[in-house]
Amino acid sequence: MSIHIVLLPGDGIGPEVTAEAELLIGSAAEKYGLDVKMESALIGGAAIDATGDPLPHETLAACREADAVVLGAVGGPRWSDPNAAVRPEQGLLKIRKELGLYANLRPVRLHPSLLDASPLKPERLEGVDLMVVRELTGGSYFGEKQEGDEFAMDLCSYSRVEVERVVRRAGGIARARRGKLTMIDKANVMATSRLWRKVTTQVMASEFPDVELEFMLVDAAAMFLVSHPARFDVIVTENMFGDILTDEASVLAGSMGMLPSASLGAGRTGLYEPIHGSAPDIAGKGLANPFGTLASVAMLFEYSLDMKEVADGIENAIRDCISDGECTIDLGGVLTTAQAGAAVRKRLPETGLSRAANG
Ligand code: IPM
Ligand code: MG
């Protein structure tokens, strides 16, 4: 059976890190004896330049047919005129929505040798291993909008079904981890947050009674994430809070370039992207850290292809690179993006399905 993967390089450092993802998928396919077909398509500013549309029809059609999508990043100063009719980010939001990818998984783990790369005190970082499950297709990102010079509006709304499905996903993840779920909201002010609390309480009581559930206001959560980050196991939260808190949480991992993500819906198809964004200031210089993208490829093998062995092989390879100091300058290394990508490929295990297939 052939595996079909669409690559969406996008803008800024997106093409550089996506190139490493493509090479890694190619190496993994060879080592594990997989038949993988990859194609690239346009998204974001690059797509606006070529077609006027941040998510051209052909791109969406290709992604709908794919088993998984790998995205680099979108956006940059060239397309950030506030009066522009189209913006690169619209392409990303639209693909998430069109593919129904309502659950965005953002794991945050700290490699021991990166304790000093974080601005936080090492003792605060001890034991940090958390997973943020961010709702991705609702809330103010997708609500009714009005935009004028005197008045503007971004409506935040959630339905029971939208909350239920993402909480269910988070509950399952918490059960498979340390059994604790923290729901983060602003229930002292927002009606949507109170619906989230009600629905979360019901889903967890009836389907995950074995998982410990706590509620936390988002302002307090922002503080605890830097003062006591190890207290969290799985976090579930609405779209905008999840966006903000995961940038904050990336500081725990030593570099924003480290954090991967998986965006999942009801089916197997997922979209995999680093959380770091397009970083136009370092684009084209070989400075970008590819590990967040390569760790996203590991998540692709785990969640869309159900190949945990391959995912573990990639994660261990990244971990070993970091242990050996084979990394980009944001992590204190001296490697370029391409060299760091090659270092990971070199460490892929020789074992696996291919060896089994060869007897
Ligand atoms: C992210 C990004 C996007 C978001 C932007 C680029 C629209 O910040 O994936 O976290 O806000 O979702
Ligand atoms: Mg963000």
Image: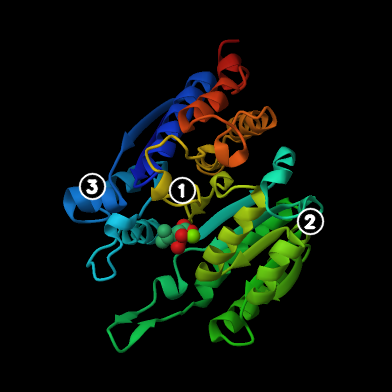
Q: How far across and how far down the image is residue 297, in percent?
A: 51, 38
Circle number at residue 124? 2
On screen, residue 195 above or below 64:
below
Res 349 → quadrant:
top right
Res 113 → quadrant:
top right
Query: Ligand 1 sits in which quadrant?
Result: bottom left
Q: Which residue is mark 3?
A: 58
Question: Image point 49% across, 53% down: which residue?
Answer: 263
Q: How far across and how far down the image is residue 148, in percent?
A: 27, 83
Amino acid at dot 1: Gly
Res 169 → quadrant:
bottom right
Circle number at residue 270? 1
Q: How is the image coloured?
A: rainbow
Lower sequence index among marks 3 and 1: 3
Is 254 in front, or is 87?
254
Count neighbours of disc 2 (C-alpha within 10 A) and say few if under 14, some if 14 to 19, many if 20 or more: some
Is 238 in front, or is 171?
238
Amino acid at dot 3: Glu
What is the distance, in whole Å, between disc 3 and disc 2 at their CAs? 47 Å
Count neighbours of disc 1 (C-alpha within 10 A) and say few if under 14, some if 14 to 19, many if 20 or more: many
Q: Of helix, strand and loop, which one carries label 3?
A: helix
In this picture, residue 301 sits left or right of residue 200:
left
Q: Nearer the viewer, mark 3 or mark 2?
A: 2
Q: How far across and how far down the image is residue 75, in percent?
A: 35, 55
